Image (spheres, helix red, strand yellow):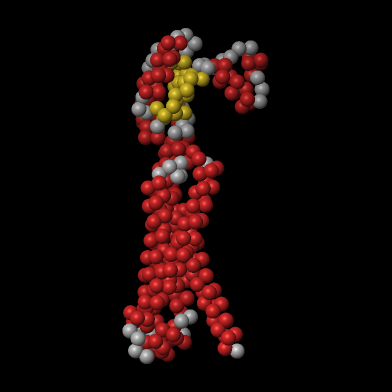
């Protein structure tokens, strides 16, 4: 009978430890994802900004030497990420593929212009700066027109600001939720041992002596939960980097070390603080209050 009871208690203890570890791991994983998102928000915003294309359409009378000089000057400009010449024939071929038919057969000629497609560095992608660059390029005598998707740029700029503010708010909320969830799991775990705590106190054990094993046990659970969270986070990063390498999520090792270290230390810190206050609460309770 006693062995059966011991096995039951052991299973109950393991179940309690498992639930605490799982709760810590899930919460820390979400915090890690959020941390990566916060640190990479600007990188993601820059990636989308650099997809905005400034098209410099050239007059049919433009000489080849003028076009070459313009392209070289654009490549060397500090605001340029890439500058690619697109011939009118290549542009017609792309347009035909997009619409699914050869429009030149219907028109009898190619109405498109030779152009240079310019992608700007993210730091120069704002409405005012792009307007200034477009005006400067359009002032050249052999340039027919300079165009870009202004509504998309304005929408992108506005949304980047909104997303940045939203992520900062979400970070604060999730950090608070993380603390409350981990704290709740640890308190429930310690609640089941409240009579042991009071018994030790009644036989003369000091508060620090009673707290010590609980704190050490939950710190180890916090470390284990953090390790599980970090392994899951590493798996997610591997998947994203393999399928979306253009995001460059693993290009900055210092950033990854900071996030992983932060998650690990946060798991220890929250476990330490939560255990301290949870045990302190039961240490300060009267014996009669333990039943409620």
> Can you give x and y, in whole percent of width and height, for residue 260 in the image?
42, 55
Q: Nearer the viewer, residue 138 or 69?
A: 69
Give the residue displayed 66% in from the left and 25% down from the top.
100
Q: Is residue 269 above or below residue 235?
A: below
Q: Residue at x 60, y 20 (%)?
A: 93
Observer able to see residue 38: no
Residue occupying the far front of the picture: 3
Asked where in the image residue 218 lies, by quadrant, the reply is: bottom left
Which image quarter: residue 220? bottom left
Q: Quadrant of the N terminus?
A: bottom right
* Quadrant in the rendering for residue 284: bottom left
Is residue 227 visible to us here?
yes
Total tally of numbered discs in the picture:
0
Identify which residue, 7 or 61, lies in the foreground: 7
Q: How far across and how far down the image is residue 12, in percent?
A: 54, 78
Q: Is residue 166 above or below residue 12?
A: above
Residue 141, x across and y down, in percent: 40, 12
Residue placed at 37% from the left, 35% from the top?
Answer: 123
The image shows residue 166, relative to residue 117, as above or below, that is below
Question: Residue at point 44% right, 83% down?
Answer: 194
Q: Residue 88, percent across and down?
A: 54, 16
């Amino acid at each position: 009978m006693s062995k059966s009871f011991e096995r039951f208690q052991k299973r109950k203890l393991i179940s309690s430890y498992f639930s605490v570890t799982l709760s810590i791991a899930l919460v820390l994983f979400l915090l890690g994802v959020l941390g990566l998102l916060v640190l990479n928000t600007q990188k993601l915003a820059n990636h989308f900004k650099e997809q905005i294309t400034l098209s410099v359409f050239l007059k049919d009378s433009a000489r080849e030497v003028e076009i070459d000089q313009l392209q070289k000057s654009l490549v060397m400009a500090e605001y340029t990420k890439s500058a690619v010449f697109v011939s009118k024939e290549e542009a017609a071929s792309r347009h035909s593929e997009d619409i699914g038919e050869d429009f030149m057969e219907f028109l009898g000629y190619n109405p498109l212009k030779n152009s240079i497609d310019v992608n700007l560095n993210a730091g120069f992608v704002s409405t005012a700066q792009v307007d200034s660059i477009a005006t400067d390029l359009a002032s050249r005598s052999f340039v027919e027109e300079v165009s870009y998707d202004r509504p998309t740029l304005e929408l992108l700029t506005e949304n980047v600001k909104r997303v940045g503010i939203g992520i900062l708010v979400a970070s604060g909320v999730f950090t608070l939720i993380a603390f409350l969830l981990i704290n709740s799991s640890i308190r429930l775990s310690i609640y089941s041992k409240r009579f042991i705590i009071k018994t030790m106190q009644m036989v003369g054990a000091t508060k620090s002596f009673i707290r010590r094993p609980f704190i050490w046990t939950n710190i180890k659970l916090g470390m284990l939960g953090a390790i599980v969270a970090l392994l899951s986070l590493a798996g997610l990063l591997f998947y994203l980097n393999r399928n979306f390498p253009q995001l460059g999520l693993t290009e900055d090792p210092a950033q990854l070390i900071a996030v992983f270290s932060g998650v690990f230390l946060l798991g220890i810190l929250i476990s330490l603080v939560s255990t301290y206050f949870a045990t302190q609460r039961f240490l300060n309770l009267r014996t009669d209050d333990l039943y409620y």
